[in-house]
Amino acid sequence: MAAVLPSVAASLGVPAPGAHEPRWPAQLVPLEPSRSAVVVLVDGLGAQLLARRGGHAPFLRSLLTSSRTLTSGFPSTTATSMGTFGTGLPPGAHGLVGYEVLDPGSGRVFNELSWKDGPDPRAWQPAPTVFERAEVAGVAVTMIGPGYFDGSGLTTAALRGARFRAGRQLAERVDQTLAALQATERADQPSRALVYLYWGELDKVGHVHGCDSWQWGDELESLDRELAGLARRLPRETSLYVTADHGMVDVPFEHRLDVAHEPDLDAGVRLVGGEPRAVQLYCETGAVADVLAAWRARLGDDAWVVPREEAESTGWFGAVSPTVRPRIGDVIAAMRGSVAVVDSRIHRPEVLSLLGVHGSLTADEVQIPLLMHRA
């Protein structure tokens, strides 16, 4: 996923970072040059889901022959993926390492999606974004999403540098996309443009009803119609790319463990972070080995349970900077079976009631599409 925006920016003529700057991925996706580009990120549209339920999406399905399957990185969750998408860096470098993570400065776990009571987002993630680099290179960059995204902590940390246009319904956002492109067409010398459109309803429907539900299929059909209309109305010399931030799996509620009712899992744990499919445990001093043994014994083959050092050495987060390392849990439990782990003492009822979940390393969760409709 780190390669998506840098590859699109390169196709618009944006130069790569200098030798002494944070580097984009060494392996970019080769894209045909174009004057303008639209990147649509559909929250929760995993590659496995699209392959399995593509009958609901004739337009997106038509792009599969020229598509690529990429990986979101770990954890496969929106806040982390937005950092990877927006900066072109792995989580260990950009520092947005989970849904709920420890702020070492305050000693508290905060939610990187809502950013409530979070740190200064520019200090938390100081690397330049791809949007900032594109603007410096003379590309007009526009971000389109719900109004509350404008100036939010996550947007500032991961996606700063774009002009913002708000729209509630997807049809409104498509119209705003076309308006942003048309604004660059009016000059005698049309400028290059990069428009980023975010759509999150598919993820919401999957969380509430499950990604195998008829409601998810209906939402995919609506999405497909709007994107087909966008493709038909694009100006000349404008490419369209559709990608996602993660996939999703349905986990029955009877397959969930609650740390609040599991004394063996709670022993030695100071704070619980991450999310139900990718739990990050911040342990009491000297308790890491005991916590690791207890979680491995309880979860068995249903999870990869590793200490932070092993997750780092095997590349789960990419190269980890010294500043980011303390944000990662001492022990990480990434689910591989049909199981999830919650903590009813800290998780809101809305989180506990979600049927569709994500965050782990399975193909259903990490594989994402990059669909291309060329200029």
Image (cartoon, rainbow, N blue to C red):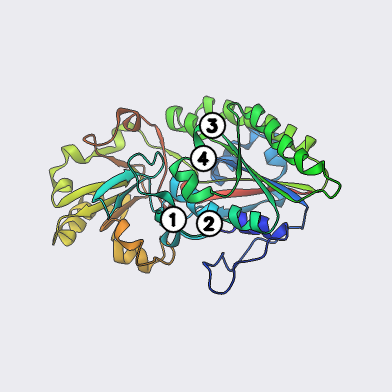
Residue 104 percent location from the top left of the image: 27, 55
- Residue 260: which quarter of the image? top left
The CA span between labels 2 and 4 is 20 Å
Q: Which residue is mark 4?
A: 44
Q: Nearer the viewer, mark 4 or mark 1?
A: 1
In the depicted structure, whether residue 194 falls above or below residue 219: below
The residue carrying pointer 4 sits among few (fewer than 14), some (14 to 19) or many (20 or more) residues within 10 Å by Cα, namely many
Left or right of 307? Residue 37 is: right
Residue 354 location (% of width, % of height): 38, 31
Q: Label 1 sits on what residue type?
A: Gln
Kindly identify which residue carries mark 2. 87
* Residue for point 50% across, 48% down: 82
Mark 2 vs mark 4: give the one in front: 2
For the residue labelled by badge 1, is the local secondary structure a helix, a strand or a loop? loop
Q: How far from the left and from the top, in percent, is residue 213?
A: 50, 28
In front: label 1 or label 2: 1
The residue drawn where x is 36% and y is 42% is: 338
Identify the mark nearer the N-term, 3 or 2. 2
Question: Which of the marked residues, 4 or 1, is nearer the chain's N terminus?
Answer: 4
Q: Tell which circle, 4 or 3, labels the residue nearer the N-terminal end.
A: 4
**Label 4 is placed on what type of residue?**
Gly
* Amino acid marked by disc 3: Gly
Q: CA distance from mark 3 to mark 1?
A: 22 Å
- Element assignment for label 3: helix
The residue wearing badge 3 is 147
How many residues crowd mark 3 within 10 Å: few (<14), some (14–19), many (20+)? few
As drawn, is 119 to the left or to the right of 173? left
Quarter of the view holding residue 41:
top right
